[in-house]
């Protein structure tokens, strides 16, 4: 798929029209496992979350960007 976003670390995986809006679905290319800010141990994946952003118009159409990003949780302290 053509990279219309030109955002580092994000790749588009789908594009569709919803009404008069162009929806681009994207996902992170690579995801580093973060360290907990409280206990400094590696966190584990805890599902995903869909974030929606309105972007600048493309081809005179409003654009909505949907990014499925991973969620993380610390097993040691629960944060």
Image (tube, grey):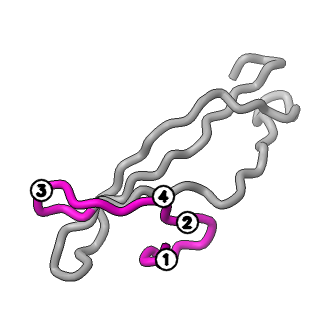
Q: Secondary structure at mark 2?
A: strand
Q: Secondary structure at mark 4?
A: strand
Q: Residue at x 81, y 39 (%)?
A: 35
* Measured Cα–Cα span from mark 4 to mark 3: 19 Å
For disc 1, the neighbor class at 10 Å (few under 14, some 14 to 19, many from 20) is few
Please report whichever mark, 4 or 1, sits nearer to the chain's N-terminal start.
Answer: 1
Q: Is residue 11 magenta?
A: yes
For disc 4, the neighbor class at 10 Å (few under 14, some 14 to 19, many from 20) is some
Q: Magenta segment, which residues?
A: 1-22
| Residue 20 on image: x %, y % | 11, 62
Q: Which residue is mark 1?
A: 3
Q: Secondary structure at mark 1?
A: loop
Please report whichever mark, 4 or 3, sits nearer to the chain's N-terminal start.
Answer: 3
* Measured Cα–Cα span from mark 4 to mark 2: 5 Å
| Whether label 1 touches label 2, CB < 8 Å | yes
Q: Residue at x 76, y 36 (%)?
A: 37
Please report whichever mark, 2 or 3, sits nearer to the chain's N-terminal start.
Answer: 2
- In the image, 72 versus 29, the foreground residue is 29
> Residue 39, relative to residue 52: is it above or below?
above
> Residue 37, relative to residue 23: is it above or below?
above
Please report whichever mark, 4 or 2, sits nearer to the chain's N-terminal start.
Answer: 2
| Whether label 4 touches label 2, CB < 8 Å | yes
Please report whichever mark, 3 or 1, sits nearer to the chain's N-terminal start.
Answer: 1
| Whether label 2 touches label 3, CB < 8 Å | no
| Residue 6 on image: x %, y % | 50, 78
Please report whichever mark, 1 or 2, sits nearer to the chain's N-terminal start.
Answer: 1
* Measured Cα–Cα span from mark 4 to mark 1: 10 Å
Q: Which residue is mark 4?
A: 26
Q: How many marks?
A: 4
Q: Which residue is mark 2?
A: 11
Q: Which residue is mark 3?
A: 19
């Amino acid at each position: 798929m053509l990279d219309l976003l030109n955002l580092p670390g994000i790749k588009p995986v789908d594009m569709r029209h919803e009404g008069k809006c162009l929806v681009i679905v994207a996902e992170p290319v690579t995801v580093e496992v973060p360290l907990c800010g409280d206990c400094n141990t590696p966190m584990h994946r805890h599902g995903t979350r869909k974030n929606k952003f309105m972007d600048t118009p493309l081809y005179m159409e409003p654009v909505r960007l949907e990014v499925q990003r991973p969620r993380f949780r610390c097993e040691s302290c629960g944060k």
